Amino acid sequence: MPYPARELLARIIKCEAGGEGETGMKAVANVVMNRVHVGYGEYLRTGQGDIHKVIYQPGQFDCVRGEIRGLPNPQTIWATPPEDVHYEIADWALSGNKLNTTGESLWYMNPFVPECPPYFPYNRTGYYQVRIHEHCFFNPTQLYAET
């Protein structure tokens, strides 16, 4: 049986950004909800406003992949249950709250280097918006509308 929306969002927040502090976790929640609510492009077509479809879309979040590069992934949404703070941030995001710093970001990534690339994904559908701790956040370019 699939997780309810609140539980699923809390789990993805913990797994993807649990070490990024409250702002980092809210930023990740913001991206998930932006994908749920975007009115055009790939995420509208594939997610159709459904948080489950957005989170489970293949290749989007490492935390829902049982394997990465052929090796077992020890860091998944199933590995550890969320804590109160993750539920609080999930409730915050599900209530329609947003961070001003992440804007309309649809992507984030950890570049494992001090500088964020100007575009991500590498097909240039997102442009750099802001860095929060280890993650870089990207807003959609006009090219995203064509995806």
Image (cartoon, rainbow, N blue to C red):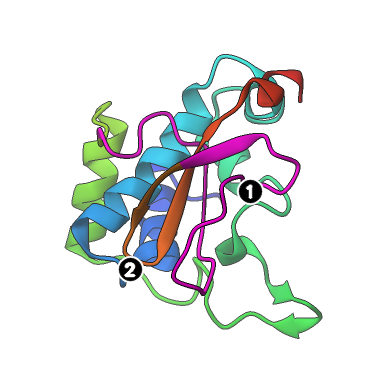
* Type of amino acid under label 2: Gly
Q: Residue at x 20, y 58 (%)?
A: 22
127 in the magenta segment: yes
Quadrant location of the C terminus in the rendered image: top right
Label 1 secondary element: helix
Label 2 secondary element: loop
Q: Nearer the viewer, residue 26 or 64?
A: 26
Residue 102, disc: none
Which of the 4 image quadrants contains residue 101?
Answer: top left
Q: Is residue 119 above or below residue 49?
A: below
Q: Is residue 28 above or below residue 32?
A: below
Q: Label 1, on which residue?
A: 56
Residue that protrudes farthest toward the right in the picture: 70
Give the CA distance from mark 2 to mark 1: 19 Å
* Magenta-colored span: 100-128
* Type of amino acid under label 1: Tyr
Q: Position of residue 75 (x, y in %)?
A: 52, 77
Select label 2 or label 1 by which is in front: 2
109 in the magenta segment: yes
Q: Position of residue 21 (x, y in %)?
A: 22, 64
Disc 1: CA contacts within 10 A as few (<14), some (14-19) or many (>=20): some
Q: Main secondary structure of the magenta part?
A: loop
Say which label, 2 or 1, has the lower sequence index. Answer: 2
Q: Residue at x 55, y 65 (%)?
A: 63
Q: How many marks?
A: 2
Q: Nearer the viewer, residue 5 or 17?
A: 17
Q: Label 2, on which residue?
A: 18
Disc 2: CA contacts within 10 A as few (<14), some (14-19) or many (>=20): some
Q: Residue at x 59, y 37 (%)?
A: 126
Q: Is residue 26 left or right of residue 128?
A: left
Q: Position of residue 50 (x, y in %)?
A: 55, 29
